[in-house]
Image: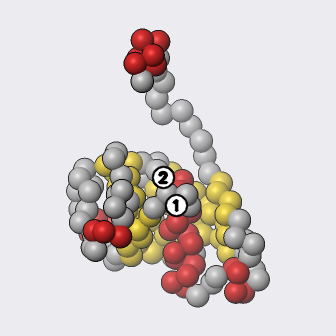
Amino acid sequence: MGNPHAVAFVEDLAHAGDLATEPPYSPAGVYPDGVNIEFVADRGPRHVAMRVHERGAAETRSCGTGACAVAVATARRDGTDPAVTGTPVTYTVDVLGGTLVITERPDGEIEMTGPAVIVAEGTIAPAWLSEA
Protein backbone atom coordinates (compact mmCIF):
# COMPACT_ATOMS: atom_id res chain seq x y z
CA MET A 1 0.00 0.00 0.00
CA GLY A 2 3.04 2.25 0.10
CA ASN A 3 3.23 2.34 3.89
CA PRO A 4 3.44 -0.52 6.39
CA HIS A 5 0.30 -2.18 7.76
CA ALA A 6 -0.23 -5.02 10.22
CA VAL A 7 -3.71 -6.57 10.08
CA ALA A 8 -5.06 -8.45 13.11
CA PHE A 9 -8.32 -10.39 12.89
CA VAL A 10 -10.34 -10.26 16.13
CA GLU A 11 -13.74 -11.56 17.22
CA ASP A 12 -14.86 -8.11 18.40
CA LEU A 13 -13.42 -4.65 17.67
CA ALA A 14 -13.51 -3.92 21.39
CA HIS A 15 -10.59 -6.37 21.67
CA ALA A 16 -8.43 -3.66 20.07
CA GLY A 17 -8.61 -1.78 23.37
CA ASP A 18 -7.57 1.84 23.75
CA LEU A 19 -5.80 2.85 20.56
CA ALA A 20 -4.55 6.18 21.92
CA THR A 21 -1.17 4.50 22.25
CA GLU A 22 0.46 2.09 19.85
CA PRO A 23 -0.52 -1.53 20.49
CA PRO A 24 2.38 -3.90 21.10
CA TYR A 25 3.51 -6.15 18.27
CA SER A 26 6.34 -8.59 17.86
CA PRO A 27 8.91 -8.95 16.71
CA ALA A 28 9.31 -5.18 17.00
CA GLY A 29 12.22 -5.20 14.54
CA VAL A 30 9.89 -6.11 11.68
CA TYR A 31 8.68 -2.50 11.57
CA PRO A 32 11.67 -0.35 12.63
CA ASP A 33 9.88 2.88 11.64
CA GLY A 34 6.51 1.92 13.13
CA VAL A 35 3.39 0.47 11.55
CA ASN A 36 -0.29 1.19 11.10
CA ILE A 37 -2.19 -1.53 12.93
CA GLU A 38 -5.67 -2.52 11.77
CA PHE A 39 -7.98 -4.62 13.93
CA VAL A 40 -10.62 -6.38 11.84
CA ALA A 41 -13.87 -8.16 12.71
CA ASP A 42 -16.14 -10.00 10.30
CA ARG A 43 -19.59 -8.51 9.65
CA GLY A 44 -20.81 -10.85 6.91
CA PRO A 45 -19.79 -12.29 3.56
CA ARG A 46 -17.08 -10.00 2.12
CA HIS A 47 -17.95 -7.42 4.79
CA VAL A 48 -15.63 -6.45 7.65
CA ALA A 49 -15.25 -3.62 10.13
CA MET A 50 -11.96 -2.16 11.31
CA ARG A 51 -10.36 0.13 13.83
CA VAL A 52 -6.91 1.52 13.15
CA HIS A 53 -3.99 2.93 15.10
CA GLU A 54 -2.02 5.02 12.62
CA ARG A 55 1.64 5.35 13.45
CA GLY A 56 2.37 8.76 14.90
CA ALA A 57 -1.31 9.70 15.16
CA ALA A 58 -3.14 7.18 17.42
CA GLU A 59 -6.63 5.96 16.47
CA THR A 60 -8.15 7.66 13.44
CA ARG A 61 -11.67 7.57 12.03
CA SER A 62 -10.52 6.24 8.69
CA CYS A 63 -7.42 5.11 6.83
CA GLY A 64 -7.69 4.55 3.10
CA THR A 65 -4.50 2.57 2.71
CA GLY A 66 -5.44 0.63 5.85
CA ALA A 67 -8.85 -0.27 4.43
CA CYS A 68 -7.13 -1.46 1.24
CA ALA A 69 -4.63 -3.52 3.26
CA VAL A 70 -7.53 -5.02 5.22
CA ALA A 71 -9.40 -5.99 2.03
CA VAL A 72 -6.29 -7.64 0.58
CA ALA A 73 -5.49 -9.48 3.83
CA THR A 74 -9.10 -10.63 4.17
CA ALA A 75 -9.16 -11.84 0.57
CA ARG A 76 -6.00 -13.87 1.20
CA ARG A 77 -7.49 -15.28 4.40
CA ASP A 78 -10.64 -16.22 2.48
CA GLY A 79 -8.70 -17.79 -0.42
CA THR A 80 -9.94 -15.24 -2.96
CA ASP A 81 -6.66 -13.90 -4.40
CA PRO A 82 -7.60 -12.22 -7.72
CA ALA A 83 -4.15 -12.95 -9.16
CA VAL A 84 -4.90 -16.66 -8.70
CA THR A 85 -8.62 -16.74 -9.50
CA GLY A 86 -8.49 -14.21 -12.36
CA THR A 87 -11.61 -12.55 -10.92
CA PRO A 88 -11.80 -9.20 -9.11
CA VAL A 89 -12.85 -9.39 -5.47
CA THR A 90 -14.74 -6.68 -3.58
CA TYR A 91 -15.02 -6.16 0.17
CA THR A 92 -17.03 -3.66 2.16
CA VAL A 93 -14.97 -2.18 4.99
CA ASP A 94 -16.68 -0.26 7.79
CA VAL A 95 -14.47 2.33 9.50
CA LEU A 96 -15.42 4.73 12.28
CA GLY A 97 -15.86 7.47 9.66
CA GLY A 98 -18.15 5.53 7.31
CA THR A 99 -18.15 2.68 4.82
CA LEU A 100 -15.65 2.02 2.03
CA VAL A 101 -15.85 -0.43 -0.86
CA ILE A 102 -12.52 -1.91 -1.90
CA THR A 103 -12.00 -3.90 -5.12
CA GLU A 104 -8.79 -5.73 -5.93
CA ARG A 105 -8.29 -6.67 -9.58
CA PRO A 106 -6.26 -9.59 -11.00
CA ASP A 107 -3.53 -7.16 -12.18
CA GLY A 108 -3.03 -5.97 -8.58
CA GLU A 109 -4.83 -2.65 -9.01
CA ILE A 110 -6.88 -1.70 -5.96
CA GLU A 111 -9.83 0.67 -6.17
CA MET A 112 -11.44 2.34 -3.16
CA THR A 113 -14.80 4.09 -3.26
CA GLY A 114 -16.75 5.79 -0.54
CA PRO A 115 -17.92 9.16 0.72
CA ALA A 116 -15.62 12.14 1.09
CA VAL A 117 -16.60 14.90 3.48
CA ILE A 118 -14.84 17.90 4.98
CA VAL A 119 -14.36 17.28 8.69
CA ALA A 120 -12.24 20.33 9.52
CA GLU A 121 -10.99 23.57 8.05
CA GLY A 122 -8.14 25.80 9.11
CA THR A 123 -5.57 28.38 8.19
CA ILE A 124 -1.80 27.96 8.21
CA ALA A 125 0.20 30.98 9.30
CA PRO A 126 2.77 31.91 6.61
CA ALA A 127 5.47 32.17 9.29
CA TRP A 128 4.93 28.54 10.17
CA LEU A 129 5.63 27.51 6.58
CA SER A 130 8.89 29.45 6.45
CA GLU A 131 10.01 27.77 9.70
CA ALA A 132 9.20 24.32 8.37
List x then y, in percent, for residue 2: 55, 57
Q: Secondary structure at mark 2?
A: loop
- Picture residue at 34% right of the left edge, 61% below the top: 32
Residue bearing the label numbered 1 = 67
Q: Report the amino acid beneath label 2.
A: Cys
Any part of residue 125 in sight: no
List x then y, in percent, for residue 111: 68, 60
- Picture residue at 48% right of the left edge, 52% below the top: 63
2 and 1 marks in contact (CB < 8 Å): yes
Q: Quadrant of residue 26?
A: bottom left
Disc 2/disc 1 C-alpha distance (Å): 6 Å
Any part of residue 12 in sight: yes
Q: Secondary structure at mark 1?
A: helix
- Foreground residue, 117 or 39? 39
Q: Quadrant of residue 23?
A: bottom left
Residue bearing the label numbered 2 = 63
> Label 2 crowding class (10 Å Cα cut-off): few <14, some 14-19, many 20+?
many
List x then y, in percent, for residue 132: 42, 24
Which mark, by number, is residue 5? none
Q: Quadrant of the N terminus?
A: bottom right
